[in-house]
Amino acid sequence: MELGERIVVVGAGVAGTTAAWVAARDHAATEVVLVDPAPGSGASWVAGGMLAPITEAWPGEREVLDLGAASLARWPAFAAAVEEASGRRVGLRTEGTLGVVVDAADREDLDRVVEHLRAWGRDAERLTGRETRRREPALGPAVRAGIAVPDDLAVDNRMLLAALREAARQAGVVERAEAVHAVVDEGVELASGVLPADRVVVAAGAWSAALHPALADLVRPVKGEILRLRARSGSLPPPAHTVRAAVSGRSVYAVPRDDGRLVLGATQYEVGFDDDVTVAGVRDLLADAERVLPGIGDYALEETAASFRPGTADNLPVFGPVPGAPSSLVACFGHGRNGILLTALTADVMAGVLSGHPVPDDIRTLVEVAT
C-alpha cells in the first residue's frame, strides 16, 4: 500500500482517537491530524464503560454478540498497550458483570437470553435471587434471579479517553480543535478553508452522516442519558461488580468506578439531536436502579448528561471505503451502544485499513473491511 503524506481523522472520541493513534504508531503517514471542535466529548464521554457482550446479548443479534466478544478478548492486551504508550491508567475493572431481574416477566426474558447464548455456544452461570445477592451484597431483596458473567468487564471511559489522547500525542498526532463542515475530494472543509489530506478517516459518530452525502443514510443519532453518583460518607459502598438489570421491561446498568462513584445508564430514544436531559429519564433511571441497589438512595447525584449513540440499520459498525464517497474517505463509525467495547477491535481494524496490517480472520468474517 502506498502511504499518503497526511491522514486527517475527523472526530476525537474513542474511535477516532484510536484510529489516529494506531495510524501514527504504525507510521501510516508522515502526518496524522485529529480534528474535533471539542476533543474527548460526545458519546465517548457520556458512556458507562461496560465491556459486556454476553450480559447485553439479545436474541436476533448474533453478529453483534460475536463482534463484541471478539473485541472483549482483545481488551486486556489493548488496555496494557494504551497504558504503556500513554503512561496513564485506563481504569479496566475485572470483577465481572451480573445480570439481574426483579419480576417474573423479566425472568422469562432472562431465560430466553440464556437459551440463545447456549445455542450460540456461549454460556452464563444461572443464579437464584439468593445466590445473586450473595455474589453482590449491594443488591437488594427485590432481585429474584440473575446470571454471572465473570468475563464481561468494564472500563472507566473518561480515563480511557485521556490515556488514548496522550498515547496519540506521544505518537506524534496533531490535535486541532475545529469543526469540520464536510469531506471533499481534497481533504476536509473547515471554517478557515480546506485542510488537504491524502486520506480522511470519518469517526464523528452520529455526526458522521452530515459530512458527505454518501454517509447520510448510514448512521443516525440514538439519544441516551446517564447519571453519575457519588457515595457519601456513611453511605453503603457501590457494588463491586457491574450490574445490568431488567426492571419491568426497562434496562438499567450500574458501573462502579475506582473512586467510589457509580455510573447509571442508559435511556434510549429516537429523537434526533435533542440533547436535553429529561425529568422522566432521570426519574426512571433512579427508580429502577434504586429498586436493584437500594443503598444508592443516600448517594449524591453529581452529574446528568445526554449524548448520541451512532446507530446503524444492523447495529454493526461501518469500516473502510464507502460507495459514492471520495476514494480518500475511510469510515470508522456506527459503533452504536458498544462504542467503548469495540475500541479494542477498532484498533486492529484501523491498523489494517490504514497501515496494511492483516486484519485478523475472526474480525474479517464479522465486518466488511477493505485494505
Image (cartoon, grey):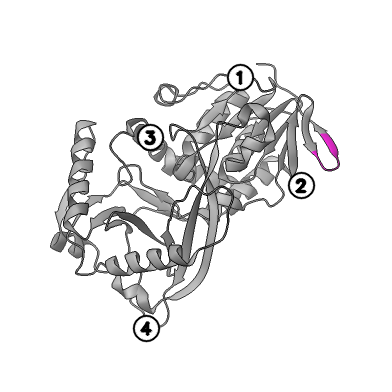
Identify the amino acid type marked 3. Answer: Val
Q: Is residue 31 visible?
A: no
**Is residue 19 found left or right of 138 in the rendered image?**
right
Q: Which residues are magenta?
A: 190-194
- Considering every residue shown, the one lying at the far right of the view is 192
- Circles 4 and 3, Cβ within 8 Å, touching? The answer is no
Q: Marks 3 and 1, Cα distance to the nearest angstrom? A: 23 Å
Identify the amino acid type marked 2. Answer: Glu
Provide the residue designation for mark 3. 64
- Circles 4 and 2, Cβ within 8 Å, touching? The answer is no
- Describe the element under mark 4 as helix, strand or loop: loop
**Position in image of residue 366 (x %, y %):** 41, 25
Provide the residue designation for mark 4. 234
Q: Is residue 227 visible?
A: yes
Q: Marks 2 and 1, Cα distance to the nearest angstrom? A: 27 Å
- Circles 1 and 4, Cβ within 8 Å, touching? The answer is no
Q: Marks 1 and 4, Cα distance to the nearest angstrom? A: 58 Å
Q: Which mark is residue 66?
A: none
Considering only order in the chain, which callout, 4 or 1, is on the residue closer to the N terminus?
4
**Is residue 95 found left or right of 339 in the rendered image?**
left
Q: Marks 4 and 3, Cα distance to the nearest angstrom? A: 41 Å
Provide the residue designation for mark 2. 178
| Classed neighbour count for the residue bearing mark 3: other residues with Cα under 10 Å, few (<14), some (14–19), many (≥20) | many
Considering only order in the chain, which callout, 2 or 3, is on the residue closer to the N terminus?
3
Eye-nearest disc, 3 or 1: 1
| Classed neighbour count for the residue bearing mark 2: other residues with Cα under 10 Å, few (<14), some (14–19), many (≥20) | some
Eye-nearest disc, 4 or 3: 3
Eye-nearest disc, 2 or 1: 1
Provide the residue designation for mark 1. 323
Considering only order in the chain, which callout, 1 or 3, is on the residue closer to the N terminus?
3
Tell me what residue is drawn at x 32 percent, y 70 percent: 290
**Is residue 265 found left or right of 38 in the rendered image?**
left
